[in-house]
Amino acid sequence: MCGEGKHVHAHPLSPRVWWTVACAALIVTVAMGVRQAFGLFLRPVSMDLEIGRQAFGMSIALSNLVFGLAQPFVGAWADRHGAGKVVVASTALYVVGLLLTTLATGPLGLNLTFGFLVGLALSGTTFVVVLGAVGRVVPPERRSTAFGIVTAGGSLGQFLVVPAAQGALNALDWQGALVALAALCATMAVLAIGVSGKPVASTGPAGAEATSLTAALKEAAHTRSFWLLNAGFFVCGFHIAFVATHLPAYLRDEGLSESVGAWALALIGLFNILGSWLWGAWGGKLSKKRLLSALYFARAVVIAIFIATPLSPLSVLTFAAAFGFLWLGTVPLTSGLVGQIWGVRYLSTLYGIVFLSHQLGSFLGAWLAGLAFDVTGSYLQMWVASIALGVFAAAIHWPIDERPLVRTPLAPVPAA
């Protein structure tokens, strides 16, 4: 089956729609860019507060967990009241969380600020909320491409915000740098204007939207394809968290310099900008489930070649470019499938549930890799597990039924 764009003439998008897409992409650029900069604060914060790196790492792990757990609820709020209100409230939490972090004196303070407050703020300023707003204004045949553009904003932020944050750290202390990042986050409240507006019921390709949030949740819960999407996105989170968290340490263990690890992460971000856009564009023309199968299988192949090839700076950077191209291409395809099958009225809620699965995979990918290394002194088991999970994800996407859900209209009530 081909995707939603086959045999459909793609009409030009209106300025209003482009404004929504642009604001959504910029919100993700700021929110994820600031989030990607947190690793720069590990050393200065842990040394200044004399808490050790494990305590700082726990605050980031807690942030990831809260980020995921809050997604279904924040998504439901966005579906009910509109993405704009959610982004504004979450922006306030982001700013307050960063400012209060400057007052932290120990692990508890970091867990409450960097961990809980910032994690909750991220849930309302990133993909789930803004993609729901975009999905409701972009025509079905262009939706996947638009999702790809917004997703690419996350990596764009990695290139624009992270170097700026490092410059702020060089010029100021870590508290001053966090204040600067808080000021940057405040701009999302203005960008929220572009994704504002209360969602209304619409007529999708299935002929009707779910009549209520409860009905939408029941429909998804009783559909095998929904759970297959959850399982696949779990694998995505596992892969990304393992590589992002442990690749630099793995390379140092193997005798390569820290600069190689830094360049590897930079290349992953760079090629993800291209990959997110292209996978999203392809999703508007081809079968999304088959593209997802191909993407996950390609991840397994790239990892297998990487660990089978003698390690060198060239092999690392080649791996980073290839894996970066596959990094977040899953986001426009997975979110696009949710909207394509179940409609866009409750897209933020349903995709929020799927994204929770992604974050649970992220938690395990980062934590199990550390545990495996502590027990065995090697990451080999995790690389092998990542290959197996990639093949698994490729297989389980194939039986997904990506046809729009057909709903039977309610029969009219007979006159008395």
Image: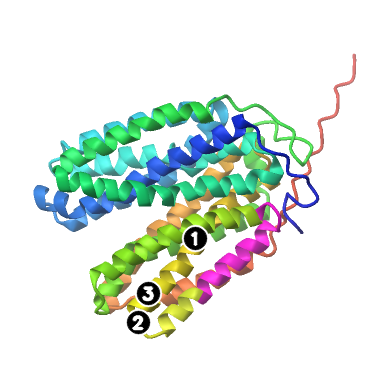
Q: Secondary structure at mark 3?
A: helix
Instruction: Residue under label 3, please give it.
Output: 316
* Above or below, 332 relative to 116: below
Crowding around mark 3 (Cα neighbors within 10 Å: few <14, some 14 to 19, many 20+) is: many
Q: Residue at x 44, y 67 (%)?
A: 321
Q: Nearer the viewer, mark 1 or mark 2?
A: 2
Q: Earlier in the sequence, mark 1 or mark 3?
A: 1
Part of the protein shown in magenta = 283-301
Pinpoint residue 318: horizontal percent, then vertical percent. Answer: 43, 73
Which amino acid is tagged 3?
Val
Q: Residue 293 or 373: which is nearer the viewer?
A: 293
Crowding around mark 1 (Cα neighbors within 10 Å: few <14, some 14 to 19, many 20+) is: many
Which amino acid is tagged 2?
Leu
Q: Which mark is residue 311?
A: 2
Instruction: Residue under label 1, please give it.
Output: 236
Q: Residue 392 or 184: which is nearer the viewer?
A: 184
Q: Are marks 3 and 2 in contact (CB under 8 Å)?
A: yes
Crowding around mark 2 (Cα neighbors within 10 Å: few <14, some 14 to 19, many 20+) is: some
Pinpoint residue 343: horizontal percent, then vertical percent. Answer: 68, 40
Q: Is residue 246 visible?
A: no
Q: Secondary structure at mark 2?
A: loop
Q: Secondary structure at mark 1?
A: helix
